[in-house]
Amino acid sequence: MVDADDELERGREAFARRAWMAACESLSHADRAAPLAAQDLELLATAAYMLGRDDDYVSGLERAHQLHLEAGAGLRAVRCAFWVGMNPVPVVMGVVNVTPDSFSDGGAWLDPDAAVAHGRELVAQGAAILDVGGESTRPGADPVSVDEELRRVIPVLEGLAGCGARLSIDTSKSAVAEAALDAGATIVNDVTALRGDARMAALIAARGCDCCLMHMLGEPRTMQSDPRYGDVVDDVKAFLAQRLDFALAQGIAAQRIWLDPGIGFGKTVDHNLQLLARLDEIAALGRPVVVGTSRKSFIGAITGREANERVPGTIATNVLALARGATIFRVHDVAATHDALAVAAATLRGRWAPATTS
Ligand code: HH2
């Protein structure tokens, strides 16, 4: 005897399968039919996934991602990118400050041998980039001459050759950037976003290296005295869009440009938090986003912790930044951040790969 419940169940399954198939057909024909909204594409891609049609799944989500980006819907674009594996593995940029006065580790790595050993240790902990700097940007820091900056950073860059990570030079001076590129750096991290030195853009264009363009209100010496914005996220986004256009006009290739909201650079605690909460709007500019929250004072303001006790706060901000589309994470505490980001990225994707380092 046929069980009526079984038959009903089989009928429902067949109906559901036909519905999914029809949805997948629409996905395949979406180019020819009326354009689909991004959220419809997401649904159709889900249908394709359930039927094991991997190509339709990927192409549907890629198109949804693009439409979300065009509509400025950063968080939705980020979500599609994670599902389809378009979001690259998070990249940890370890900080190597060769300075006497950096806000959290000033003087610790002023000796070149100590700085090189520290950099190599950060690579062993998971840093894919080392950001070497010879001038502190903390509020009130004294300016450093070109000669002094060169004396600090060049031996360290030379000593880090072959360390297994890409080398970045954290400078606003084209003469320092040029010597650093000659010494093996392939990234210029310019906290003035090409506004500090008129020769910087042409140098980066000519050398074809990567560059990070960061937002800063005012200049380091005075930037924390009463910073004001209309809407901080809108203002920072407009600034970065304008600097991106400038860099492109100067001949720097789009794929060489990274953007950074400049956490702590002319921002109150609230400004920093709003930028992190709405980081997906910066990611919607379509370029890799760098974030530098590491040990910064807004974490101290919230937790009451000293700079060297701000690792948990740093991790919290970086994990949330990852979920909002950031890809490069500039930190002092590499081992802990690397592990947190690896687990967070695997969770966002719903997939993982075994660690290659112990
Ligand atoms: N923050 C600092 C320095 N450089 N570069 C980018 N792209 N983004 C940042 O957020 C950023 C940066 C400040 O941190 P630190 O280097 O540790 O301090 P100091 O400037 O005092 O050396």
Image (spheres, rainbow, N blue to C red):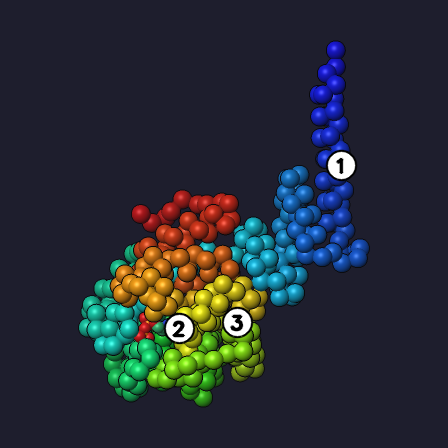
| Quarter holding residue 225 | bottom left
> In terms of sequence position, does the residue under pointer 3 or pointer 1 come before the other?
1
At 73% across and 30% down in the image, what residue appears? 12
| Residue visible at 21% across and 73% down in the picture | 107
Please tell me whether mark 2 sits on a helix, a strand or a loop: loop
Residue placed under numbered mark 3 in the picture: 233
Q: Amino acid at mark 2?
A: Gly
- As helix, strand or loop, the secondary structure at mark 1 comes to helix
Dots 2 and 3: beta carbons under 8 Å? no
Which of these two is toward me, 260 or 251? Answer: 260
- State the CA–CA distance, disc 3 to disc 1: 45 Å
**Residue 269 screen position, x and y as percent:** 41, 70
Q: Which residue is mark 1?
A: 18
Q: CA distance from mark 2 to mark 3?
A: 14 Å
**Can I make out residue 124 in this image?**
yes
For marks 1 and 2, give the CA distance.
54 Å
Q: Which residue is mark 2?
A: 264
> For the residue marked with disc 1, what is the amino acid?
Arg
- Identify residue type, mark 3: Val
Ligand 1 has an atom within 8 Å of the beta carbon of the residue at disc 2: yes
Q: Nearer the viewer, mark 1 or mark 2?
A: 2
- The residue located at (59%, 54%) in the rendering is 80
Residue 300 picture quarter: bottom left
Look at the numbered discs 3 and 1 and tell me whether their residues touch, using CB distance below 8 Å.
Answer: no
